[in-house]
Image (cartoon, rainbow, N blue to C red):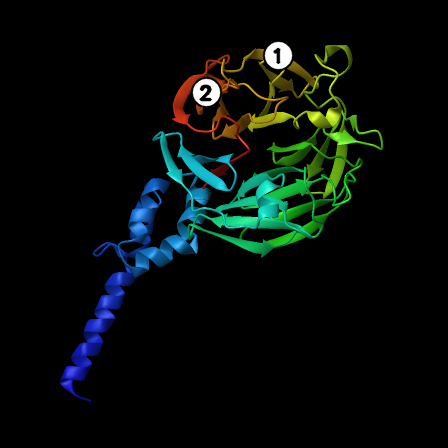
Amino acid sequence: MSLAYQSGNQRRAMDNSESDSLIHGIGRDNSISCLIRCSRADYGSIASLNRSFRLLVQSGELYRLRRYTGRIEHWVYISCNLLEWEAFDPNRRRWMRLPMMHSNECFFFSDKESLAVGTELLVFGKEVMSNVIYRYSLLTNNWSSGMRMNFPRCLFASASLGEIAIIAGGCNSQGHALRSAELYNSESGSWQTLLDMHKPRKMCSGVFMDGKFYVIGGVGGSDSKLLTCGEEYNLSTGTWTEIPNMSPVRIGAARENELPATAEAPPLVAVVDNELYAADHASMEVRKYDKERRVWVTVGRLPERAASTNGWGLAFRACGHRLICIGGPRASGEGFIEVNSWVPSEGPPDWNLLDRKQSASFVYNCAVMGC
């Protein structure tokens, strides 16, 4: 073997070794320890440095370590125009546009649900003959489709906890309310069928609280009656427990209109620091659930411009240690949305305007991704 050939191999080996170490001189492990301290917003630039950095970012390893070490950043993903999504970083108050979704006309006009889990944004809708799920990957900045639930549905309750999410209730293609539930693992891309709920329900909402999954409110029965109860799913035992009066939706004399139950949006609920909050769109109030007494208590007001159409078009989400309320005025010609934030641990609702953005003022879908 020639000395020149050996020298060439040695140089390539050294180049590969230096590349694998990522940041030259400190080694791969120390490099990764530095990188998980960077903002999520920097990872696009980091991935463009070379192939090793790109493969590291796209592997998801950085986000798994961030989750393990508690270095999670929460971004808000919203859609105010059909098939168009933007991400909002509430810390830097910066907007980022996602690639356009490419779908057929049927999906374009169908009702959609959204859910962020792990490093994925899932958008659920309908095509001509079946339900479909579009998946946006933060790792590759691309949309894909083809994933299927075990029991396709719409108008369901959902919430995520780290890399897993649970979807429960909703209705099938015939419009019948479901009691079935499924767990999605974003690491494996697999769906697991869970034990059925006690009651079939659609147009319900879901949250994780104290390590358990809750389905709240909704519509059920042959007469499409509002359900005031909730159901708690224990991940350890795999069982459901019905909880009376858990829905924040006012019924009877307290309701301010005579609209059918299906005309109103599902309950606008969110959990911050294991406390459950609700936005009452009719009274423009924020309410908190007392877990000990199992009652809802009014704690303050929603932002002044948080208008909605029977709850539709308004986003109310948990974003780390704060609540985010996104909406805009319903008046014609008022083409903007406002992103307002409140940290419940700091006292009664005192909303902080994070940003006002020129946009259609109706929020079709909203999800929060923490990674």
Indicate the secondary structure of the residue bearing disc 1: loop
Quadrant of image for the C terminus: top left
Tell me residue 216's x, y (percent).
69, 29
Q: Position of residue 129 (x, y in %)?
A: 69, 53
Q: Is residue 221 above or below residue 331?
A: below
**Which residue occupies the foreground of this view, 45 or 13?**
45
Amino acid type of the residue tagged 2 in the rendering: Glu
Left or right? Give the position of 70 relative to 44: right
* Residue in the foreground of this view, choosing between 143 and 119: 143
User: Image quadrant for the N terminus?
Assistant: bottom left
- Res 161 visible: no
Residue at the right extreme of this rendering:
222
As drawn, the label of residue 334 is 2
Other residues around mark 2 within 10 Å, as few (<14) / some (14–19) / many (≥20): few
Q: Residue furthest left?
A: 4
Residue 325: x and y in percent read 50, 23
Q: Going 56% across and 40% down the picture, which residue do you hit?
A: 115
